[in-house]
Amino acid sequence: MSKEFVVAVCGATGAVGQEMLKVLEQRDFPYSKLIPMASARSAGKKVMCKGEEHTVVEMKEDSFEGVDIALFSAGGSTSEKFAPCAAKSGCVVVDNSSAWRMNDECPLVVPEVNPHDLDWHKGIIANPNCSTIQMMVALKPIHDEARIKRVVVSTYQAVSGTGQKAIEELENQVRRLMSGQPVVADVYPHQIAFNCLPQIDVFMDNGYTKEEMKMVNETTKIMGDPTIKVTATCVRVPVFYGHSESVNIETEEKLTADDVRALLAKSPGIIIEDYPEKKAYPMPINAAGEDATYIGRIREDETIENGLNMWIVSDNIRKGAALNTIQIAETLIERDLVRVP
Amino acid sequence: MSKEFVVAVCGATGAVGQEMLKVLEQRDFPYSKLIPMASARSAGKKVMCKGEEHTVVEMKEDSFEGVDIALFSAGGSTSEKFAPCAAKSGCVVVDNSSAWRMNDECPLVVPEVNPHDLDWHKGIIANPNCSTIQMMVALKPIHDEARIKRVVVSTYQAVSGTGQKAIEELENQVRRLMSGQPVVADVYPHQIAFNCLPQIDVFMDNGYTKEEMKMVNETTKIMGDPTIKVTATCVRVPVFYGHSESVNIETEEKLTADDVRALLAKSPGIIIEDYPEKKAYPMPINAAGEDATYIGRIREDETIENGLNMWIVSDNIRKGAALNTIQIAETLIERDLVRVP
């Protein structure tokens, strides 16, 4: 990694953009120049990275001349508009929105799972959905070892996945309820404080939400295996940071709970936290701010021949977004792929 | 229901006991005399029912002379000690603890599901676990119609299931966090505010919690069908009232989502709330204080031949405890079973 790169962070003032700057600093990402970009509304703001102050510039179609890598977290429509301009300028885009994920021209990558898919990129690489990423980190070693046939997942997702305004909404609702005041729901369709909302993103015609279908469709693309069947129920819970997932797995071949613990313990990006006797298991408050995907409550499910249950927790803003995006950029550098073919 | 009965509420000062008094009043339960009982510590306290004040008396072995029906919610060990004394005195016990649930001599009853099991009672009837009750209300009509083979359930359980002290713990933790103070966990092993705890009750040798195994074992007893396989992951979430469940079901015969909606809409104790276009689905804040089991997010699961997903929410203190107990007592009266054989 001796070469250094001109890096743009697009959407630098949002929750994920801010976390990207933090991760670039923490991992000492090899940039020669950092260009934070955002909409006209945020242009002129100051952001910090590696001890230096940078002024946010407005993202325009010609902003990407001379940029090597653009890390996008600016929403789907902005990404649809600007990512192709960036790629046309010879800049490799790693995009955190859902705009390019299911596009056949764009690899969808979790570096621990399918780094090889970066080899065929054409300028735009998609970062998967937060709930999908942490599940992929956990499932890939199991799939390699025993072939996963079916997954039933129920999520417990933090409000930070919706963005900064949702974090403020949960906090405001809690404060109002605690002082006996009526609650206003603005970001979410209903009160999130002390509640569970079984809706994340919009509803599709089949009755599933878009978030649930992302978990179904992104899984087969990332795993490179259309035979893995996933059914999902995605639920927002009153947690600030950290998505949790209750995952039931059916495999072709038998794995005991001990097999799974041993297998995952040596797999990348995973920390096993599975000590019932110590009441130790993954929890969102512990995963917040951390890089790893935490896995616990690993049990054999005796209701089917080769069944497993587990509980997967990770920081949705880090591994679920900013960290995975920057790990993709690092992998592009390692594999000498920082150029648009 | 012309006859009136002497009714004891045992554990009258606890969260469920208080709710029992409320339900007795709301349903105008036909008692000629009400005797609230509790431990020596709470004896002398005053409780209200049907506009009258009653003094709590200490529960002793000879307290049940002349009592027709005793509604117990006083914990497992108290119930183990006093329920047999009560039954020996000719008093029919409906017990809300887990002490008698799997005892072959004791029916385990959800009145909408297996009222006929009351016919063979020998003096002690068990009220099922809260998470099991609401799932049974939803699953029974489906099982009757299409035979359920397997259930994968993940729960989102409210702190009120643990009792009054847990309600206070969540509230105190939230207040402290909102004012930047460190949090103390006393009732739960870890902070519950803004967190998810994948542990309810103690761990068993097989890695499952006792709560999870209750859902597995109570289901087959209540349904009277040992072939129904259940695997459960039980999680505590920072919600005050109302348990939610994400339930995946495999049936012998095909049911469409519309079939299930039509079937459940005409089944007892259920309100269907399944209007994605209006963002209407069951939520714990709406179920709190209500009698019904709310069901929504009904979808076909295409990953198996006959699969269904649904979201089931009910007030864990009412249908999950106090209401179901009193419905059992009402059904005993209807079936003329208020006597110990």
Image (cartoon, coloured by chain):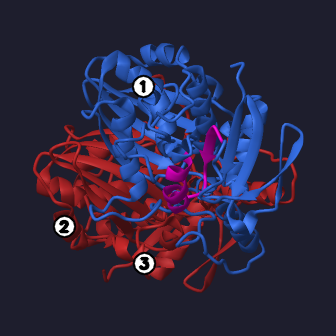
Chain colours: A red, B blue
In the rendered image, residues at marks 3 and 1 fall on the same chain: no
> Is-magenta flag for residue B83?
yes
Residue identified by numbered label 2: A258
In the rendered image, residues at marks 2 and 3 fall on the same chain: yes
Q: Earlier in the sequence, mark 2 or mark 3?
A: 3
Which residue is nearer to you in this view: B132 or B256? B132
Q: Secondary structure at mark 2?
A: helix
Query: x and y percent of residue A228 in the render?
Result: 23, 41
Q: Which mark is residue B140?
A: 1
Which residue is nearer to you in this view: B137 or B66? B66
Q: Secondary structure at mark 3?
A: loop
| Residue A23 versus residue B286 in the image, above or below | below
Please state which amino acid type lies under the numbered disc 2. Answer: Asp
Magenta part of the protein: which range? B67-86
Please state which amino acid type lies under the numbered disc 1. Answer: Lys
Which residue is nearer to you in this view: B166 or A255? B166
Subunit that carries the residue with mark 1: B
Q: Cα distance, mark 2 to mark 3?
A: 37 Å
Question: Who's the residue at 29% across and 23% down the image?
Answer: B306
Q: Is residue A128 visible?
A: no
Outermost residue toward the left in this view:
A253
Subunit that carries the residue with mark 2: A
Residue identified by numbered label 3: A29
